[in-house]
Each structure stands twice: as structure tokens, then as C-alpha cells.
Amino acid sequence: DSGVTQTPKHLITATGQRVTLRCSPRSGDLSVYWYQQSLDQGLQFLIQYYNGEERAKGNILERFSAQQFPDLHSELNLSSLELGDSALYFCASSARQGWETQYFGPGTRLLVL
Amino acid sequence: GESVGLHLPTLSVQEGDNSIINCAYSNSASDYFIWYKQESGKGPQFIIDIRSNMDKRQGQRVTVLLNKTVKHLSLQIAATQPGDSAVYFCAENGGNAGNMLTFGGGTRLMVKP
């Protein structure tokens, strides 16, 4: 158990819908990262937050957004969902923002029908 | 763009043998490298990391070797056990803003009893 929690574990929805994925980092960690894992793209970095502020952005679609709250939990919002958004979404956390180990949560499996 | 890749998609070894998983990276600015293990249905689990000022680092039954000249990273697992069966990913943090990781495509390690 990494100490990072993610909810829900599974999510099934329809195209065009919007969903919110939630992540709680390890106790004391200030950075949260979101990754998408699909069969054809592998693990792709989406976005990083550090202590409530956006720190780095990767290949995140404009339909996707995230935020980190004062209690340091984070939410990833996915809107106007398409079939191709079906994937595993992982959250990771680290103590700060430098060369540090990122610990991954168990992931949320999203299926868009 | 810059990427991290793996030479072999599947590696099959006999229980008790040593395993070597290889990874090539192309970003010469990369200064931090990590190996993760991912079991079916779980998030990536940290195994070992190495910084660019090191050539070798050892953990419990695992060793990571870094050859900056040819931009090559390897993970050696001693006395491979059935529990080592998983997909292994290398990742690099190319000195970018924040701490985003770029992952390789993964190698599946299968341990035969």
C-alpha cells in the first residue's frame, strides 16, 4: 500500500458525460501528479500540482482539468467524454517537487461507452 | 520528441535465475531515473531510482545500472521469484520544471517455476 488513495476504483459512463476522479496523497506530501495509462499510449503524464498550485503540464486535453484543494487532495475532471478517454487514471504524490520518488495510487479505471 | 523506450516487450526467465531488463532513453538532459513494477490491476510500485551522478545503485535483490555515454539504463533482479512477475517500467525526469516523469513502454517479466 503506497498510502495514496483514489476513488472511485471503477467508473462506467457514456460519451459526452463528465466525471470527477479523486485522489488523496500520502500524508505530508505536497505534490500530486495525474497520469493516464492506455493500451496504445502507455503511461502519460497529465498534470502536476504542488501545494495547491499548478506546477507542470503534460499532454492533457483541454476537456480535462484538475485542481488541488487546501487539504491537498486533488480532483481530475474529465468532460465531453469520448470513447478514446477510456483508460486507467493514476494519481501519484511526492513530498515536494524535485527529484523525488513518486508513489502511485491504485488507479481509477474509466470506461466510456 | 524525447522519449524513453524499452528493447524487449516480454522477458521469460526461470525461477532462481537473474533477470536483466533494459531501457534506452533519448533525453540527454535526463538526470533522474526510476524503475517501477506494475502488477495486474495495481498502480506502479517504486523499485529503485538512480541519479545521473551515479553509475550503479543496489537495493534488495535489485541493481540499477546507468550508462550515460550510450543513454542506457538496466534493472537487474537477482534470484528471480514468481512474485517478480509483472510489467516493469523505466521512467526519467529530464530536468524539467516540476517532476514530471516520462515512462518507457514497459517490459513484461514472466517467471517460470
Image (spheres, coloured by chain):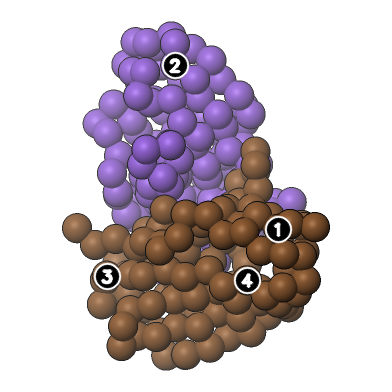
Chain colours: A purple, B brown
Q: In whole angstroms, how far apart are the C-alphas of marks 1 and 3?
A: 30 Å
Could you tell me if residue A21 is visible in this image? yes
Residue drawn at x 24%, y 31% is: A62
- Above or below: residue A27 compared with residue B57: above
Tell me the subunit letter for badge 2. Answer: A
Q: Is residue B14 left or right of residue A75?
A: right
x, y percent for residue B78: 70, 77
- SS of the residue at dot 2? strand
Res. B111 mark: 1
Residue drawn at x 55%, y 29% is: A109
- SS of the residue at dot 3? loop
Tell me the subunit letter for badge 4. Answer: B
Q: In whole angstroms, how far apart are the C-alphas of marks 4 and 2?
A: 38 Å
Res. B26 mark: 3
Mark 2 crowdedness (10 Å alpha carbons): few <14, some 14-19, many ≥20? some
Q: Is residue A37 left or right of residue B20?
A: left
Q: Amino acid at mark 4?
A: Ser
Quadrant containing the C terminus of chain A in the rendered view = top left
Query: Tags 1 and 2 in contact by the CB under 8 Å rule?
Result: no
Tell me the subunit letter for badge 3. Answer: B
Mark 1 crowdedness (10 Å alpha carbons): few <14, some 14-19, many ≥20? many
> Between tags 4 and 2, which lies in front?
4
Q: Is residue A21 left or right of residue B23?
A: right
Q: In whole angstroms, how far apart are the C-alphas of marks 4 and 3?
A: 24 Å
Are discs 4 and 2 both within one chain?
A: no
- SS of the residue at dot 1? strand
Query: Tags 4 and 3 in contact by the CB under 8 Å rule?
Result: no
Q: In whole angstroms, how far apart are the C-alphas of marks 2 and 3?
A: 34 Å
Location of residue A6 (image quadrant): top right
Residue drawn at x 66%, y 63% is: B13
> Between tags 4 and 3, which lies in front?
4
